[in-house]
Image (cartoon, rainbow, N blue to C red):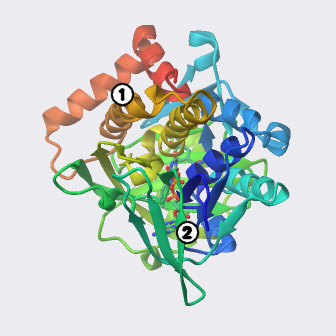
């Protein structure tokens, strides 16, 4: 088998890259470890930056997103019984949209199948070979049969636990990591959202987030201990704890109901450099992870896709290598800014086990300056809606 670009990973990064390249006549094969249903059952991001929305439109996969999404002109931050709005539209004339990663991934799978582009599911034992040479190839096992695909390039879109990142030798790669001492317990419930915008809550009991997917599908999170287990939390326990962490006026109007999904995600900041080794390019969670506080995970994967897509089109159409030669540098410049915002918002809104009284005073002072200082709010708004590509 031969193709131009082998994409490892059929998550949003791989699918979006594949769809964009297809529309430029560049052939790809996606290798996905799981089944399509398994990938679509994962509940993840909910906020899309304008950059990602524009790429979905360029990929020709935005019809349902444009029809069903919520446009959010701002977000709310609460601290104990106080709550304030950061109005992106008023401050910087921009917004974000609420459209679940699950839906976005579903749309991309449908689009890929509609154009007949090749995706091989349930692959095993994927190996990237000769990535540092001019004729890379990928071997894998499918249905018990060893297979090989020769290609020009490999896009490692296989997430944090994939094989792409570690294909880059330890002598070349440098990883940067910070593990946070808590996780997020999230639930999905078929209930109306408690507020028309998201609420990021800082409380003396820990962080909480009120989010949504549509007018009758809500997504909520509470900060929990790393040792916590989903089975320790009944739905009632969750709702009671959420009510303790948001302002009374919000708790009073919260509509509760049975959870249809419940999971705990650990929080970490992680970046692996470089994001290119020879003809292998890392994209998305394969190269970096952020705590979801700043809603940057999926959106930073999108900017990687943007840079790699542009670079590969330039190579195939203009026989230019400037884009691919500068891919890692360009992608990392934006990645680190997203890491900074995600780290800063996580420190601002969570309770840390080792926080002193002084630390709590500093956290409170920072939230209050965000509440009353327009310059601080503009910085938050510019980062939350997404820095330019
Ligand atoms: P993904 O991990 O989504 O996709 C990688 C794909 O590669 C997977 O389908 C996997 O099965 C496949 N794969 C792995 N190894 C392979 C191999 N060896 N061979 C073939 N295929 C392989 N971001 C936010 O912005 N907001 C959130 O609320 C949020 N919540 C999250 C919750 C959890 C539990 C996790 C893990 C992440 C969350 N994220 C969130 C971040 C998330 O949205 C990612 O940024 C996004 O999925 C990145 O997409 P990909 O880079 O495509 O990686
Ligand atoms: C979500 O809706 O899942 C979500 C929204 C914003 C975040 C994190 C998660 O910052």
Name the spot of residue 204 as percent of width and height, x first: 33, 45
Q: Is residue 196 left or right of residue 172?
A: right
- Look at the image and tell me whether residue 236 can be seen: no
Q: Secondary structure at mark 1?
A: helix
Q: Is residue 28 above or below residue 198?
A: below
- Assess disc 2: are there few (<14), some (14-19) or many (≥20) residues with their C-alpha within 10 Å of its C-alpha: many
Q: CA distance from mark 2 to mark 1?
A: 35 Å
Identify the residue position indicated by label 2 in the image.
Answer: 262
- Assess disc 1: are there few (<14), some (14-19) or many (≥20) residues with their C-alpha within 10 Å of its C-alpha: few
Q: Nearer the viewer, residue 318 or 232?
A: 318
Q: Residue at x 39, y 59 (%)?
A: 164
Name the spot of residue 372 as percent of width and height, x first: 43, 13
Viewer-nearest of discs 2 and 1: 1
User: The N terminus is located in which quarter?
Assistant: bottom right
The image quarter containing residue 115 is bottom right
Identify the residue position indicated by label 1 in the image.
Answer: 333
Q: Residue at x 46, y 30 (%)?
A: 321
Nearer-N-terminus badge (2/1)? 2
As drawn, which residue projects farthest toward the bottom? 144
- Look at the image and tell me whether residue 101 can be seen: yes
Q: Is ligand 1 less than 8 Å from the beta carbon at label 2?
A: no
Q: Residue at x 47, y 72 (%)?
A: 139
Q: Secondary structure at mark 2?
A: strand
Circle number at residue 104:
none
Q: Are marks 2 and 1 in contact (CB under 8 Å)?
A: no
Q: Is residue 221 above or below residue 225?
A: above
Q: Nearer the viewer, residue 36 or 124?
A: 124
């Amino acid at each position: 088998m031969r193709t131009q670009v082998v994409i490892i990973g059929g998550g949003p990064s791989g699918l979006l890259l594949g769809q964009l390249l297809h529309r430029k006549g560049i052939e790809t094969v996606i290798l996905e470890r799981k089944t399509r249903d398994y990938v679509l059952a994962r509940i993840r991001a909910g906020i899309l930056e304008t950059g990602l929305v524009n790429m979905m439109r360029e990929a020709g996969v935005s019809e349902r997103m444009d029809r069903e999404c919520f446009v959010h002109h701002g977000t709310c931050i609460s601290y104990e019984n106080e709550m304030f709005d950061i109005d992106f539209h008023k401050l910087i004339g921009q917004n974000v949209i609420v459209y679940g990663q699950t839906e976005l991934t579903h749309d991309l799978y449908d689009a890929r199948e509609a154009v007949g582009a090749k995706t091989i599911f349930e692959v095993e034992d994927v190996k990237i070979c000769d990535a540092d040479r001019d004729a890379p190839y990928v071997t894998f096992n499918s249905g018990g049969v060893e297979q090989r695909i020769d290609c020009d390039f490999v896009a490692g879109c296989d997430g944090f636990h994939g094989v792409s990142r570690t294909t880059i030798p330890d002598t070349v790669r440098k990883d940067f990591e910070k593990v946070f001492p808590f996780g997020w317990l999230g639930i999905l419930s078929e209930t109306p959202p408690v507020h028309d915008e998201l609420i990021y809550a800082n409380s003396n009991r820990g962080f909480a987030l009120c989010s949504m997917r549509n007018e009758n599908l809500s997504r909520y999170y509470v900060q929990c201990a790393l040792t916590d287990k989903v089975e320790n939390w009944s739905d009632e326990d969750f709702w009671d704890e959420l009510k303790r962490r948001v302002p009374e006026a919000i708790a009073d109007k919260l509509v509760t109901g049975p959870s249809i999904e419940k999971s705990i995600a650990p929080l970490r900041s992680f970046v692996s450099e470089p994001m290119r080794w020879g003809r292998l390019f890392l994209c998305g969670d394969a190269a970096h992870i952020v705590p979801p506080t700043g809603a940057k995970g999926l959106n930073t994967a999108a900017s990687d896709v943007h840079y790699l897509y542009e670079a590969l089109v330039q190579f195939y159409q203009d026989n230019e290598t400037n884009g691919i030669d500068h891919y890692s540098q360009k992608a990392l410049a934006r990645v680190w800014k997203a890491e900074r915002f995600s780290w800063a918002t996580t420190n601002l809104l969570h309770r840390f086990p080792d926080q002193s009284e002084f630390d709590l005073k500093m956290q409170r002072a920072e939230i209050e300056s965000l509440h009353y200082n327009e310059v601080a709010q503009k910085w938050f708004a510019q980062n939350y809606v997404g820095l330019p590509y």
